[in-house]
Amino acid sequence: MTQEESTTPSAFDLIGGEQVIRALADRFYDLMDMEPAYKELRAVHGSTLDDARDKLFWFLCGWMGGPQHYIERFGHPRLRARHMPFKIGILERDQWLACMDQAMDEVKVNADIRARLRESFFQTADWMRNQ
Ligand code: HEM
């Protein structure tokens, strides 16, 4: 995120660090797998979500201003390019955002940080659209 955040608490600190982000990534993919409301989003993914779960956890730690686990393993995220093989339209974007919001609710992410993340997730997910 920004330079400023080296002196002010990062989203990573505010959310509660790695333990909460791990729980969030796990809940996100459990819900995607389980809930009929996310069925088109689930269909874009492969048969197993195990790799995606770890990668989202590693990515989110760095994206929120914490340890750069994803970059250490895979280099620059290049998220838009990495998502090009998957069909991402409005429907998939909105299901991703709703699934993440439900996961944030269930993991009990504090309301202020949840509102801030919801906005950032929207920007990122919308930029990923390729249809
Ligand atoms: C907008 C709708 C989105 C769709 C349909 C989507 C779909 C996918 C799919 C199918 C994969 C591959 C999973 C696998 O390797 O098994 C993936 C990977 C990933 N997604 Fe998304 N995604 C979306 C949005 C996002 C957003 C908003 C973020 C981050 C805030 C994100 C972060 C990631 C990361 C970090 C990976 C792993 C990339 C890699 O190293 O291969 N995705 N996504």
Image (cartoon, helix red, strand yellow):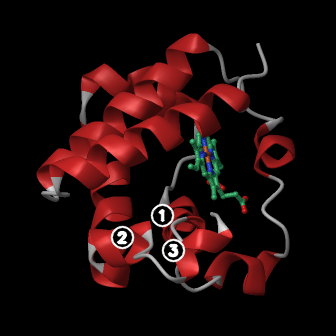
Q: Quadrant of residue 63?
A: bottom right
The one nearer the camera, 4 or 96, is: 4
Residue 44 rendering spot, x and y as whole percentages: 60, 32
Q: Secondary structure at mark 2?
A: helix
Q: Residue at x 67, y 23 (%)?
A: 88
Disc on res. 53: 1
- Between the residue at mark 1 and the residue at mark 2, the CA separation in whole angstroms equals 11 Å
Q: Residue at x 58, y 40 (%)?
A: 45
Q: Are marks 1 and 2 in contact (CB under 8 Å)?
A: no
Residue 114 rendering spot, x and y as whole percentages: 28, 48
- Between the residue at mark 3 and the residue at mark 1, the CA separation in whole angstroms equals 13 Å
Look at label 2 and name its amino acid. Answer: Ile
Q: Please give the residue where the numbered disc 2 appears in the rendered image.
A: 21
Disc nearest the viewer among 1 and 2: 2
Q: Are marks 2 and 3 in contact (CB under 8 Å)?
A: yes
Q: Is residue 21 visible?
A: yes
Give the crowd class for mark 3: few <14, some 14-19, many >=20 residues within 10 Å: many
Disc on res. 61: 3
Q: Is residue 32 visible?
A: no
Q: Secondary structure at mark 1?
A: helix
Identify whether 86 is placed above or below 72: above
Relative to residue 110, is residue 114 drawn left or right? right
Task: Give the quadrant of the C terminus.
Answer: top right
Task: Give the quadrant of the N terminus.
Answer: bottom right
Q: Are marks 3 and 1 in contact (CB under 8 Å)?
A: no
Look at label 1 and name its amino acid. Answer: Arg
Look at label 3 and name its amino acid. Answer: Cys
Disc nearest the viewer among 3 and 1: 3
